[in-house]
Image (cartoon, helix red, strand yellow):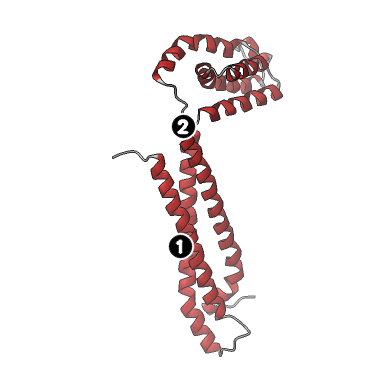
Amino acid sequence: MALPTTTDYTTRMNEVELALRNTSNTLTNARSEFEKANNPAVFFTDEERAVRQERALPALEAAEAAATQAVEDALTLASDVTDLTANAAPALNPADEAIAASRAVFVREDVDTLSVRELTQRIRQAALQDDRVSLFLYLRYAPDRLKAQAKASGPYDEGDTPWDTVDTDGDARSELRVVLNDVRDSFRNPDMKQLQDKAVALRGVAYKLHEDVRKRARQNETYVFQAKGEVTW
């Protein structure tokens, strides 16, 4: 079985977004029909009103259930796509991979021995020179430095390297984190960026429908109780 491609994910998100909009329209129509039966400006006998409510209620409940399911489907898909794009590993062409293999030990030494500010400056220099191989390697090893720095904020433990006890500057670590994010973005496949943006948009549509369902549910609660013959206070 073939793995999904970016086109497959885009198509699926388009389908799910269309389902969200369709269920939203269906829900609006079902609410309109249900509210007509409860319109005090229209005269109905109690019996007529009860019959109209009873007829309209199943469609309303089905529309609300469909909307809730559509929201869950959309949020699940958006989450899956977000994880996919966030975890997409940067890559080099075969020729650059050979260069990276020979340079890795030197970049690793930079990561282990430079201060956080010096390391950040070294990465910026590589970016100015468009040194993709070095940037690739910094992106591979520098996150380990940030993890070690989190440990450095605690008590000194035997076996810590010297910079574990020196580079505790939170601003410097934040700056390094920002630079690494920029480098990661520079390696990101444009198709992945489009997928990520699409997932964000899909999540926005889903949340809007979710809030609409919650908002209207309270508004219709009294009507539903009445339609079922229950007493509200």
Disc 2: CA contacts within 10 A as few (<14), some (14-19) or many (>=20): few
Residue in the foreground of this view, choosing between 215 and 178: 178
The amino acid on which the numbered mark 1 sits, given as a three-letter code, is Ala
Residue at 51% x, 67% y is 27
Which residue, as the protein is rendered here, is positioned at the far front? 129
> Left or right of 99: which side holds 139?
right
> Left or right of 98: which side holds 47?
right
Nearer the N terminus, badge 1 or badge 2? 1
- Per the image, the residue denoted by label 1 is 66
The amino acid on which the numbered mark 2 sits, given as a three-letter code, is Ala
Residue 198 on image: x %, y %: 50, 45
Residue 228 on image: x %, y %: 51, 77
- Per the image, the residue denoted by label 2 is 88
Determine the secondary structure under disc 1: helix
Determine the secondary structure under disc 2: loop
Which residue, as the protein is rendered here, is positioned at the far left? 1
Q: Is residue 87 above or below residue 66?
A: above
**Viewer can see residue 159:** no
